[in-house]
Image (tube, helix red, strand yellow):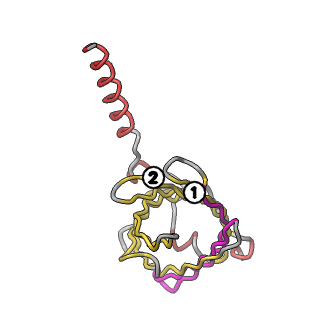
């Protein structure tokens, strides 16, 4: 019996080590192309489609999102209009500011505090606390959002949602620049 416990313990330890070594860091993308530029990508009209998964990996929401970004120097405004599969809509207006060191900060009415993000190569990692309205009242969750620029037209966003440090969901969004924004 001791042998099986040892084998089980060793297998669990190996799984934890392999999972922790699979985590990527922003520095892993340094020098990759296309080089993501928050200001350049989020200027003009964009369209996105996404879904929200719960902690079990089940899709619990589907949505489309219309975006419009404008900038004056290094200060930007990003308007988002979400339309959910059941017809509900939600607006968010980001107030963004690019910093000198490949970082950006942002604020929105449902964001608690300041969102912070950093860019390296084609990736941008954005983290913030978000207040979500639920049937039981508002809750605050933490999002660790990775944006990956595919090319000059397309971007994929993958955000982990955590509550009390535990994964409670995920948001996946595919965003495309619209023709009108290309001039």
- Residue mark closest to the camera, 1 vs 2: 1
Q: In the image, what residue occupies the spot 70% across and 65% down?
A: 85
- Percent coordinates x, y for residue 84 in the rendering: 66, 68
Taking the magenta stretch, the answer to whether it contains residue 178 is: no
Q: Residue furthest bottom?
A: 72
- Percent coordinates x, y for residue 64 in the rendering: 67, 67
Q: In the image, what residue occupies the spot 57% across and 58% down?
A: 52
- Percent coordinates x, y for residue 11 in the rendering: 35, 24
The residue carrying mark 1 is: 172
Where, quadrant-wise, is the C terminus in this rendering? bottom right
- Element carrying mark 2: loop
Instruction: Using the image as rendered, state which of residue 14 and residue 147 is in the foreground.
Output: 14
Q: Residue furthest front?
A: 136
The quadrant where residue 156 appears: bottom right
Vertical placement of residue 55 versus 88, above or below: above
Q: Which residues are magenta?
A: 60-85
Residue at mark 1 to residue at mark 2: CA–CA distance: 25 Å
Is residue 13 found left or right of 147 in the rendered image? Answer: left
Where, quadrant-wise, is the N terminus in this rendering? top left
Q: In the image, what residue occupies the spot 61% across and 58% down?
A: 51
Instruction: Using the image as rendered, state which of residue 94 and residue 177 is in the foreground.
Output: 94
Specify which label sits upstream in the sequence, 1 or 2. Answer: 2
**Label 1: how many residues lie within 10 Å, few (<14), some (14-19) or many (20+)?**
some
**Chief secondary structure of the magenta portion:** strand
Q: In the image, what residue occupies the spot 51% across and 55% down?
A: 170
The quadrant where residue 102 appears: bottom left
The residue carrying mark 2 is: 31
Is residue 43 found left or right of 115 in the rendered image? Answer: right
Vertical placement of residue 113 versus 145, above or below: below
Is residue 66 found left or right of 172 in the rendered image? Answer: right
- Element carrying mark 1: strand
Q: Residue furthest right?
A: 179
């Amino acid at each position: 019996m001791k042998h099986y416990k040892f084998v089980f313990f060793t297998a669990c330890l190996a799984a934890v080590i392999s999972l922790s070594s699979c985590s990527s860091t922003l520095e892993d993308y340094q020098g990759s192309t296309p080089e993501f530029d928050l200001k350049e990508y989020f200027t003009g009209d964009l369209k996105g489609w996404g879904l929200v998964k719960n902690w079990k990996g089940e899709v619990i929401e589907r949505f489309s999102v219309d975006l419009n970004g404008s900038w004056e120097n290094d200060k930007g405004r990003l308007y988002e209009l979400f339309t959910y599969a059941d017809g509900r809509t939600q607006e968010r207006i980001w107030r963004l500011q690019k910093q000198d060191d490949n970082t950006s900060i942002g604020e929105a009415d449902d964001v608690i505090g300041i969102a912070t993000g950093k860019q390296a190569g084609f990736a941008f990692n954005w983290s913030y606390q978000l207040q979500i309205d639920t049937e039981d009242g508002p809750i605050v969750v933490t999002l660790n959002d990775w944006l990956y620029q595919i090319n000059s037209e397309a971007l994929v966003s993958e955000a982990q949602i955590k509550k009390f440090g535990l994964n409670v969901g995920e948001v996946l969004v595919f965003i495309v620049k619209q023709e009108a924004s290309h001039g």
